[in-house]
Image (spheres, rainbow, N blue to C red):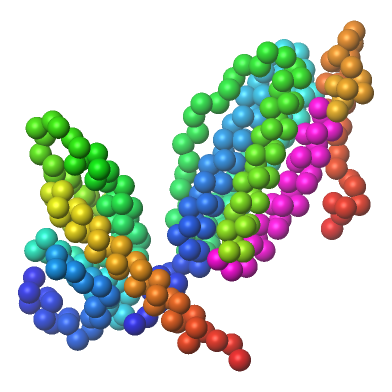
């Protein structure tokens, strides 16, 4: 009897479901960053708004990368519903605290998928995930650094204006991130 | 329906069967035939997975505990598949059992292929 299941698709049902969950998380993340960009723009933090617009684009790119992988492997990529996006923030700092939380949650989620890939010996998907693991190093670094600016610059006086100006310049060029 | 079954029987391999029905695989067509509720229906890879998720999604416990007088009948309609099942609660349980067994056997078949035929020396 032919193994039609395997002939049609490389992914197991569990891994496919996890990847579809991740697609949803990335879409959610992209929408959250867009809401953050909107809040920053409305409150006069234009550089931070630009930073979050870029972050939103990146998350969308991650979503599509996962989406295409699922399809390429013969799976069913599901277009996610995105609802319940927080639109208002109490403070400028809260926006960055939420952004870091968001990245930590995404990293955790990728670790979970990778652990499942190892368990199932799906080394093909595991290798594919490596790109995202590396990306998360940068994402977490940037989010953590942005929050750090609140400590090193301080919010008093023109502090928030200074922070806003510096947020957009955050780069991850550590040698540990080099190709 | 019976004619279809006899004509194609040579190409069919039984995947799993219960008292309520059976699932056959046709290697030549790369699909499965489900003999259930007096129908023999062809399912390709995508539709079989859709059927599985539709049946697994049915909350059997909720239907059992439902005190309202609504009939315990579920319509299972698979998009892009020319058939639909109208099943009562017992049939849903039977179909679920049939599909669970089928997917265990398909997984077993995969393991056998991996261990016996896909060994790179």
Classify the position of the C terminus of chain A by image quarter.
Answer: bottom right
Which of these two is toward me, A43 or B54?
Answer: B54
Nearest the eye: B11 or A113:
A113
Can residue B64 be seen from the camera position used here? yes
User: In the visual, does A80 lie left or right of A138?
Assistant: left
Location of residue A168 in the rendering, given as x and y in whole percent from the top left corner = 82, 29
Q: Residue at x 48, y 87 (%)?
A: B116
Q: Position of residue B17 (x, y in %)?
A: 21, 72
Left or right: residue B1 versus residue B32 is left
Q: Quadrant of residue B71?
A: top left
Q: Residue furthest top?
A: A157
List the single residue furthest toward the bottom: B121
Query: Is residue A58 positioned above or below A97 on the image?
Result: below
Q: Is residue B101 magenta?
A: no
Q: Is residue B105 above or below residue B78?
A: below
Q: Residue furthest front?
A: B65
Q: Is residue A125 visible?
A: no
Q: Please provide the residue range marked out in magenta.
A: A120-147
Residue A74 placed where, x, y %?
Answer: 47, 64
Give the x, y percent position of residue A128.
65, 60
Q: Is residue A138 magenta?
A: yes
Residue at 62% from the left image edge and 57% from the top image edge: A115
Question: Which residue is at 36% across, 72% downward?
Answer: B106
> What's the residue at 13%, 31% (across, down)?
B68
Residue B42, image quadrant: bottom left
């Amino acid at each position: 009897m032919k193994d039609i299941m395997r002939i049609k698709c490389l992914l197991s049902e569990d891994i496919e479901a996890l990847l579809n969950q991740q697609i949803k998380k990335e879409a959610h993340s992209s929408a959250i960053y867009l809401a953050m960009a909107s809040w920053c723009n409305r409150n006069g933090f234009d550089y931070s708004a630009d930073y979050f617009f870029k972050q939103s684009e990146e998350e969308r790119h991650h979503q599509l990368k996962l989406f295409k992988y699922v399809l390429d492997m013969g799976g069913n990529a599901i277009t996610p519903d995105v609802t319940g996006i927080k639109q208002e923030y109490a403070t400028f700092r809260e926006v960055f605290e939420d952004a870091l939380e968001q990245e930590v949650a995404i990293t955790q989620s990728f670790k979970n998928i990778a652990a499942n890939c190892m368990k199932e010996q799906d080394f093909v998907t595991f290798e594919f995930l490596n790109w995202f693991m590396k990306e998360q190093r940068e994402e977490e670094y940037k989010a953590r650094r942005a929050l750090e600016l609140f400590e090193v610059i301080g919010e008093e006086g023109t502090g928030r204006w200074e922070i806003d100006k510096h947020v957009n310049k955050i780069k991850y060029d550590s040698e540990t991130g080099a190709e | 329906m019976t004619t279809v079954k006899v004509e194609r029987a040579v190409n069919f391999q039984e995947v799993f069967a219960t008292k309520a029905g059976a699932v056959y695989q046709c290697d030549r067509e790369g699909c499965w035939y489900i003999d259930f509720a007096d129908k023999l229906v062809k399912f390709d890879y995508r539709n079989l997975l859709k059927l599985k998720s539709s049946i697994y999604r049915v909350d059997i416990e909720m239907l059992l505990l439902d005190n309202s007088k609504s009939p315990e009948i579920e319509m299972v309609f698979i998009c892009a598949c020319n058939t639909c099942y109208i099943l009562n609660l017992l049939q849903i349980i039977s179909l679920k059992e049939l599909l669970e067994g089928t997917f265990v056997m398909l997984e077993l078949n995969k393991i056998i292929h991996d261990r016996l035929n896909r060994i790179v020396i």
